[in-house]
Image: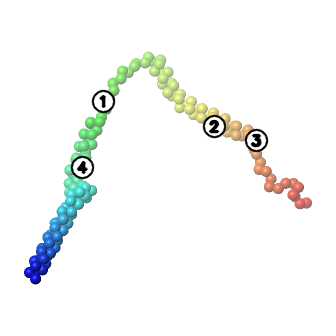
Amino acid sequence: MDRKLQQNQEIERLIQAAQIARSYLEVEALSLQQRLDIPTRIRGSLKSHPTGWLVGSAVSGLAASLMFRRRPVVTEKRHRSLPLAVLGLAFAAARPIAKVWITDQLKTYLTGSAANRPIKHPSPTHTPSQEIF
């Protein structure tokens, strides 16, 4: 009988130890879940320290733009003579006019060739021999 009592006490002790361990594991799992939930942590930090996040993003953006900025390539500018500069300006001004003129010529050619094509009439649905007089 004493042996059964000892076994029951041992079982009760094991059950209590399992409940304590289970509650400890639940607390640890919840703590780990909160530490690993990055989006929620960032959202909370943004709500509690918005100025810090704004300043930090501005500083990091400025640093990145300064780090990746290209140095301007120094090229020697050729000085053209006055007649060549005037000729270059004339070609630059004539380019849009030429583009419009060529477009109009192409449009005229295409519409003219379409007007000169014979028009095909649809075939009649009945033949003259089917007509009743």
Q: Alpha-carbon distance for marks 2 and 4?
A: 57 Å
Q: Amino acid at mark 3?
A: Pro
Labels 2 and 3: the sequence-earlier one: 2
Assess whether mark 3 and mark 2 are in contact (beta carbons under 8 angstroms). no
In the rendering, which numbered label is found on residue 54? 4
Between 123 and 30, the residue placed more toward the observer is 30
* Left or right: where 92 falls relative to 61: right
Labels 2 and 4: the sequence-earlier one: 4
Q: Residues within 10 Å of mark 3 (few under 14, many from 20)?
A: few
Q: Alpha-carbon distance for marks 1 and 4?
A: 28 Å
Q: In the rendered image, which residue does mark 3 sit on?
A: 118
Q: Residues within 10 Å of mark 2 (few under 14, many from 20)?
A: few
> Residue 47: x and y, percent?
23, 57
Q: Amino acid at mark 1?
A: Arg
In the rendering, which numbered label is found on residue 116? none
> Residue 111: x and y, percent?
67, 39
Labels 1 and 4: the sequence-earlier one: 4
Q: Residue 22 lies in what quarter of the image? A: bottom left
Secondary structure at badge 2 equals helix
Labels 3 and 1: the sequence-earlier one: 1
Q: Residues within 10 Å of mark 1 (few under 14, many from 20)?
A: few
Assess whether mark 4 and mark 3 are in contact (beta carbons under 8 angstroms). no
Between 91 and 77, the residue placed more toward the observer is 77
Residue that appears at 44% across and 17% down: 81
Labels 1 and 2: the sequence-earlier one: 1
Residue 23 seen anywhere in this rendered image of the structure: no
Q: In the rendered image, which residue does mark 1 sit on?
A: 71
Residue that appears at 53% across and 28% down: 94
